Image (tube, rainbow, N blue to C red):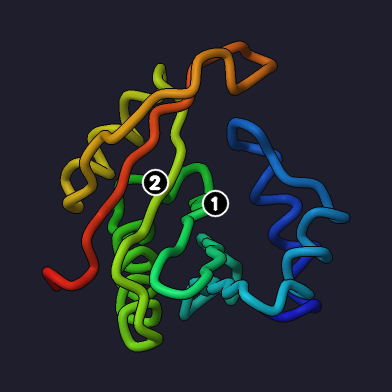
Amino acid sequence: MEPGDIDRIVLLEQDGLSPWDRDALVREIGIESGVQFVLEGEECGDILGWCCSRWLDTEAELLKITVMKGKRRGGIASALLAHLVRHLAVHGVATLFLEVRADNLPALRFYRKHGFNEVGRRRGYYADPADDALIFSKDLLDN
């Protein structure tokens, strides 16, 4: 992800739960321990999806993965996640964590399909709408 991508990512974020605003995206690019990836459409040049993560030593957290409405369930999130996992593993990260809304059934299926296991719950973590956060982890050394 580059600063020139931010306007397109802001538009993409508007169609998801808990969207990030421009300021959050700008801050994320400046995080030294962070990594962000975009997937662009070959024909249209649109950003079809993006993800970001931060890591410290051997642990990382997937902070965000978003795919353009109308392009979901087409392998974009899987491609982004696979690229991120490879990148983190090369940098010595052993475990990837994430939080997901307890009511987000498509996301829960997606993460379980990709080898994540539920390891905890944060009650009342999300607002607008209110929801618990489920904590998942994935061992990257198994890949």
Which residue is disc 1 drawn over? 64
Q: Residues within 10 Å of mark 2 (few under 14, many from 20)?
A: few
Q: Earlier in the sequence, mark 1 or mark 2?
A: 1
**Residue type of the residue flagged with mark 2:** Arg
Secondary structure of residue under mark 1: strand
Whole-number angstrom distance, CA of label 1 to CA of label 2: 15 Å
Q: Image height check: is 18 above or below 43?
A: above
User: Residue drawn 41% across and 65% down?
Assistant: 59
Q: Nearer the viewer, mark 1 or mark 2?
A: 1
Residue 16, relative to residue 127: is it above or below? below
| Mark identifier at residue 72 | 2
Q: Amino acid at mark 1?
A: Lys
Residue 34 picture quarter: bottom right
- Image label count: 2
| Furthest residue in direction front, as rendered | 57
The quadrant of the rendering that contains the C terminus is: bottom left
From the viewer's perspective, is 88 left or right of 65? Answer: left
Q: Is residue 21 left or right of residue 131?
A: right
What's the residue at 46%, 80% (across, down)?
42
x, y percent for residue 4: 79, 78
x and y, in percent, of residue 64 in the image: 54, 51
Which quadrant of the view contains residue 120?
A: top left
Which residue appears at 69% of the width and 59% of the height? 9
Q: Residue furthest left?
A: 142
Foreground of the two, 83 or 99? 99
In the image: residue 125, left or right of residue 84? right
The spot of residue 36 in percent (x, y) is 58, 72
Above-or-below relation of 58 to 52 = below
Q: Quadrant of the N terminus?
A: bottom right
**Which label was assigned to residue 40?**
none
Element type at mark 2: loop
User: Percent from the top left, x then y, of residue 17?
Assistant: 59, 31
